[in-house]
Amino acid sequence: MTKSLRGWIAGSAVFASLCCLPSVIWVLFAGSSAIVAADQLSNNLYYSWVRWALYGTSTIMLSVGLVLFYRSKGICTIDDVLRERRRVINTTLATFTLTILFYLVWNYLVLEVIGIAVGLPWEESAFWN
């Protein structure tokens, strides 16, 4: 992957995890007094329509990144896309796959471990239990 696509992949994966990231940051800066409120915030965001809105916005961000990437490579028209069909399909599939993998590792491993470490009550709902 080129440098420009790496930024779009990481940015869209982190954006998709904004239902849990604010709670971890809140507890990191506010301390243990904010644990209950931060947990409630993450529950409200994760178990509502907001999570799906974040996923949709992340998909749109990644699609815009791909369009900009292809245009920078000289693939600007439908005819160019048809001529470079294999390259476009492979790059698009690889980009979406890497984004999903990055999101899963970031959200369900890194953020969850950090959240548990700072005191958020996420251990009983962790994926390894």
Image: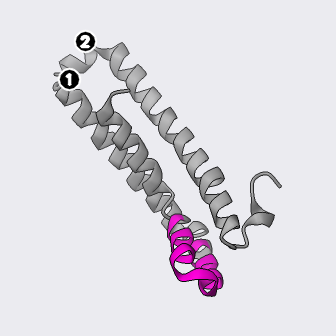
Please give the residue where the numbered disc 1 appears in the rendered image.
Answer: 73
Q: Nearer the viewer, mark 1 or mark 2?
A: 1
| Residue 75 locus on image (x, y percent) | 20, 22
User: Callout 2, which amino acid?
Assistant: Arg
In terms of depth relative to the viewer, which is nearer, 105 or 73?
105
Helix, strand or loop: magenta stretch: helix
* Quarter placement of the C terminus: bottom right
User: Callout 1, which amino acid?
Assistant: Lys
Q: Secondary structure at mark 2?
A: helix
Q: Residue at x 46, y 35 (%)?
A: 96
Quadrant housing residue 84? top left
Please give the residue where the numbered disc 2 appears in the rendered image.
Answer: 83
Q: Secondary structure at mark 1?
A: loop
Left or right placement of residue 25 versus residue 82 in this view = right
Give the CA distance from mark 1 to mark 2.
Answer: 13 Å
Quadrant housing residue 74? top left
| Residue 125 locus on image (x, y percent) | 76, 63
| Range drawn in magenta | 21-42
Reply above or below: 2 against 57. above
Left or right placement of residue 77 versus residue 102 in this view = left
Tag 1–tag 2 contact (CB < 8 Å): no
Quadrant housing residue 86? top left
Report the number of numbered marks.
2
Q: Residue at x 65, y 84 (%)?
A: 36
* Quarter placement of the N terminus: top left
Residue 73 part of the magenta segment: no
Reply above or below: 2 against 20. above
Q: Residues within 10 Å of mark 2 (few under 14, many from 20)?
A: few
Q: Earlier in the sequence, mark 1 or mark 2?
A: 1
| Residue 17 locus on image (x, y percent) | 51, 58
Looking at the rendered structure, which numbered label has been put on residue 62? none
